[in-house]
Image (cartoon, rainbow, N blue to C red):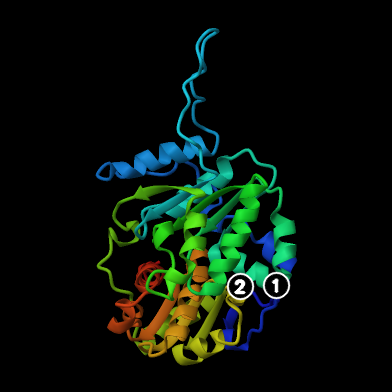
Amino acid sequence: MTATRTGIVHLVDRQPQLSGQDMVSALVPPPQFAGATFESYRADADHPSQQEAKEKLAAFAGGGSAPARGGLFRRAKKGPEKKPGVYLDGGFGVGKTHLLAAIYHAMPARRKYFGSFIEYTALVGALGYKNTVDLFRGADLLCIDEFELDDPGDTMVMTRLLGELVASGTRLAATSNTPPNALGEGRFAAQDFLREIHAMASSFETLRIDGTDYRQRAVDGHADVLTDDEYDKRISAVAAHGLVSDDTFTALVAHLAQVHPSRYIRLIDGLDAVGVREVTVFDDQSAALRFVAFIDRVYDAQIPIRATGLSLDGVFPEEMLAGGYRKKYLRAISRLVASTLS
């Protein structure tokens, strides 16, 4: 987006563009999981479901042992029906995305894609539904990270898309903090879409992964807050050898409303740190959800955040945390804490 590789920039001045082809090219695991493997996934011995999920997913990706075959006069035992998809349900920071990326890397597939839920829905918006189906038809594997159904439109689009792809032989792997039969619960009139939601869920074998958020194991759970002087020094230090953004929280949040979430990844292109001044609490849920999507991109890119004002783990008020997007906000808090301490 810019030839400048050092200094200070303002995100509010950036108007990123992203073509459909750019979106498709970006459908690979984020940099932090570029080398993720099943071997490098460290299962927590206190939570056996992690090792169990790891072994089942390795088999799903083609790395498990083949089932025993029948003898000359013996009929091979018929195992349980294999579903075309696996669905990783678990809390924050238990390694779901690592395992999803490990599936992507391990599966010997010619055509495979890895993206967040919002990237796939944005692609439909950019290319149109039919063109998106044509693009993915015949793909061997589709990995979907952070599966969320926040509105009826997304429900219909994704269930139709996945249904058509499964029918053409595509295998699916997804992660979420919500079991597939509960997607959409508490967010809209889910009963009106139960048939679509259940039809989608029938394509997946659900694997529950328990554990403790690895991002919180060594921290106190609060985002780092800087004084104005500390902030200026940190920003200047980064700017001396890299590129750092500097915006007020209010201005940044307002700008996010003018940029489609699919383009947030380009909004932070080239940055070595994100600076946010005068952080305050949200009073608008739409703005809060856009900020969550932004933080997802910042975290995936492993860009540190420096901030003043309110601690970033306190930007979502209690009434928001008690609502239908609770898990989404809690995931963002976990990532905000980790990003300010990196």
Evaluate whether residue 274 shows in this view.
yes
Q: Residue at x 51, y 64 (%)?
A: 300
Q: Where residue 262 is drawn, which disc sits there?
A: 2
Which residue of the protein is positioned furthest toward the top in this rendering? 73
Instruction: Please state which of residues 318 and 256 is positioned toward the viewer in this rendering.
Output: 318
Q: Which mark is residue 126?
A: 1
> Which amino acid type is shown beneath numbered disc 2?
Ser
Q: Is residue 241 visible?
A: no
Residue 206 image offset from top left, x and y in percent: 42, 48
Structural crowding at the residue carrying mark 1, measured as other residues with C-alpha within 10 Å and reported as few (<14), some (14–19) or many (≥20):
some
Is residue 120 or residue 13 the one in the foreground?
A: 120
In this view, 121 is above or below 257 = above
Quadrant of the frame with the C terminus: bottom left
Q: For this view, does 202 lie left or right of residue 207?
A: right
Residue 73 position in % (x across, y down): 53, 7
Q: Cβ–Cβ below 8 Å for labels 1 and 2? A: yes
**Residue toward you, 314 or 170:** 170
**Mark 1: amino acid:** Ala
